[in-house]
Amino acid sequence: MAQFKPDSGSAGASAQATTVIVCTSCRGADGTDARPRPGENLAAAVKALAPAGVAVHGVECLGNCKRRLSAAVVSPDSWTYVFGELSEDSAADLILGAELLRDAADGVMPWRGRPDSLKRGLVARIPPLTKPEQA
Amino acid sequence: MAQFKPDSGSAGASAQATTVIVCTSCRGADGTDARPRPGENLAAAVKALAPAGVAVHGVECLGNCKRRLSAAVVSPDSWTYVFGELSEDSAADLILGAELLRDAADGVMPWRGRPDSLKRGLVARIPPLTKPEQA
């Protein structure tokens, strides 16, 4: 569904894309502040795997610290998903989840085919403002 | 920041508003399925308090079941916030949080002035796709 954002400028293409947002400040199970943090490693791994049409951003804190290594998958006119309890090995799962959401005509990430880590680790899902009738 | 959505139709006004989304399927501490659920009562209370410019929607499940009664606050071009551990008395706190986010020029709900329940109960925050440079 097309959106016109007169102010989006060069960020427009990215703003339209299905996006994986990885918390780069998440610590590992040992709780140390050592760098790179597991979240940084995961963000780099997701970026390395991202296909065309899936953007990846790191963000300093997703506020989900109680459930450890976290990421969100966001797509225009779709539900937003937040996942926790991820690991540095979760990059392929996040990309698969992003592709499922990108290709979902109803804006819902299907349960069938969703990687186990994105079932167990679901922290929250938020409906899109553009489809309030679903909310 | 104005957005033009040619397809928004009658939902347009709502789609542009700062919105509180309350999980209406959340059970109380006793875990019973009795209706109305605490989430339904909270949604009704938030609706009753909502000022102009703040929309309220109930949604069947925000997927945050591990942290009980939940709501999200969403606003165009702003970070999205998910809160848990709310109670049926949290309506005024959610409205205050929505007003803080609606009025925040930087799209971030300020910590100062935020009700305690929206500090303790923060489950996750997700940056807006329209400002990927912040993410």
Image (spheres, coloured by chain):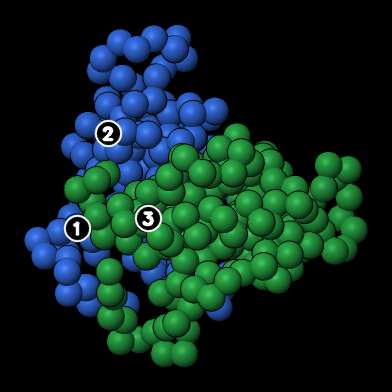
Chain colours: A blue, B green
Q: Chain of mark 2?
A: A
Q: Chain of mark 3?
A: B
Determine which residue is flagged by label 1.
A14
Amino acid under disc 1 = Ser
Disc 2 to disc 3: CB gap under 8 Å: no
Q: Position of residue A67 (x, y in %)?
A: 53, 29
Q: Position of residue A19 (x, y in %)?
A: 29, 52
Q: Residues within 10 Å of mark 2 (few under 14, many from 20)?
A: many
Q: Position of residue A69 (x, y in %)?
A: 43, 29
Point out the tag, 2 or 1, that comes first from the N-terminus. Answer: 1
Amino acid under disc 2 = Ala
Quadrant position of the C terminus of chain B in the picture: top left
Numbered label attached to residue A43: 2
Eye-nearest disc, 2 or 3: 3
Q: Chain of mark 1?
A: A
Q: Position of residue A51 (x, y in %)?
A: 20, 50
Q: Residues within 10 Å of mark 3 (few under 14, many from 20)?
A: few
Amino acid under disc 3 = Ala
Visible residue check, residue A64: yes
Q: Distance from label 2 to label 3 (Cα)?
A: 28 Å
Question: Same chain for the residues at labels 2 and 3, yes or no?
Answer: no
Visible residue check, residue A118: no
Eye-nearest disc, 1 or 3: 3
Q: Residue furthest left?
A: A10
Quadrant position of the N terminus of chain B in the picture: bottom left
Q: Secondary structure at mark 2?
A: helix
**Residue B37 appears in which quarter of the rendering?**
bottom right
Residue A19 position (above or below residue A129): above
Determine which residue is flagged by label 3.
B104
Task: Tell me the residue at 28%/80% (across/down).
Answer: B4
Q: Secondary structure at mark 3?
A: loop
Numbered label attached to residue A36: none
